[in-house]
Image: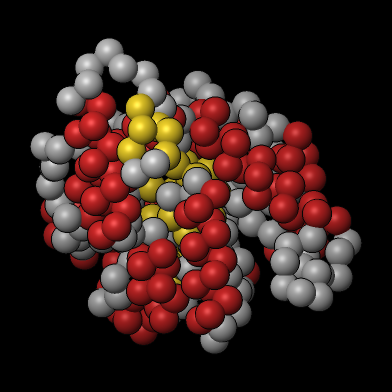
Amino acid sequence: MLFVPGDSERKIAKAISSHADALILDLEDSVASSRTHVARAIVLEYLQSRPQSQRKGQQIWVRINALSNPAALHDLAVVAGAPDGIVLPKVHSSHDVTRLGHYLDALELREGVAAGSIRILPVATETPQSLFTLGGYEGCGPRLTGLTWGAEDIAAALGASNNRRPNGEYDTVYELARALCLIGAATADVQPVDTVFVDFRDSAGLEAEANLARQAGFTGKLAVHPNQIDIINQAFTPSDDEISWSRRVVEAFASNPGVGTMGLDGKMLDMPHLKRAHKILAVAASLHGGGDDRS
């Protein structure tokens, strides 16, 4: 998911040609407050020029301002362009998602947009309060599609001068935020999306962080520059070896119905391994635009 400043027609045009699965047209942090009205107009015009039937698989999301900011209600004028989703920053709890859902219910009806079609992705760790509520997103509404996290705003809120240690690893608070986001998403049965890697010139650092995020259980990552997209896509794409292993695991259990554990290549397998294999094959099938009867 690639962030694009909503007030830059040039950057939006460039982002269209990227391999990002989704663009996040930004009305918040990357836009000066004096240009927010300009960004709203550009974003709405762009959405209306590319209805969902013409988006060719690249979703268009909009990051609005926080609901605590009066600008957020003005930002929701973009509903008239039927975005695929809204990224909601600086939430305090799932109540913010529920509140936004109510707004979207009314606005979709008014604008003739399909009811319930606009999804919500909260940035769920940007306020101190939010770290205490990450287990509460289960059942907050069908619009919730995932949880993502951010390390910059929470650092500012805590008065931190940096959110990383000298070796480049996140400091304790931000590791905690990341872990709670991952666990909260699993609790709510939605996708966990890893945060941005702000040093867009450090390709090796991005690759390492993206690989670790996928290993931990994240299913995608936010990006701040088009050059990051191919690295992120590669990190989150199952390798040929993973797909081969997963097929063999599924076939082994299918050939031995009723068996809960078995050996394969000298390793003991049980139900968690089968579940992981199914997930890998499902991801591989979705990336190739179709199903896989072996998954």
Dividing the picture into quarters, in which one does residue 182 lie? Answer: top right
Q: Is residue 224 above or below residue 261?
A: below
Give coordinates of residue 66: x percent, y percent: 62, 50
- Quarter assignment of residue 160: bottom right
Q: Residue at x 28, y 37 (%)?
A: 249
Residue drawn at 22 percent across, 21 percent down: 256
130 lies above or below 69: above
Quadrant into which the C terminus falls: top left
Q: How many marks?
A: 0
199 versus 294 height, above or below: below
| Viewer can see residue 295 | yes
In this image, 182 relative to 84: left or right? right
- Residue pictured at 25% horizontal, 27% vertical: 253
At a point 74% along the width and 55% down the height, the residue shown is: 174
Left or right of 139 on screen, residue 245: left
Q: Is residue 145 left or right of residue 239?
A: right
Q: Is residue 120 visible?
A: no
Q: Identify the image quadrant of the N terminus.
A: bottom left
Q: Position of residue 129 (x, y in %)?
A: 77, 39
Q: Nearer the viewer, residue 15 or 194?
A: 194
Which x, y percent locates residue 233?
36, 65
Q: How is the image coloured?
A: secondary structure
Name the residue furthest top: 258
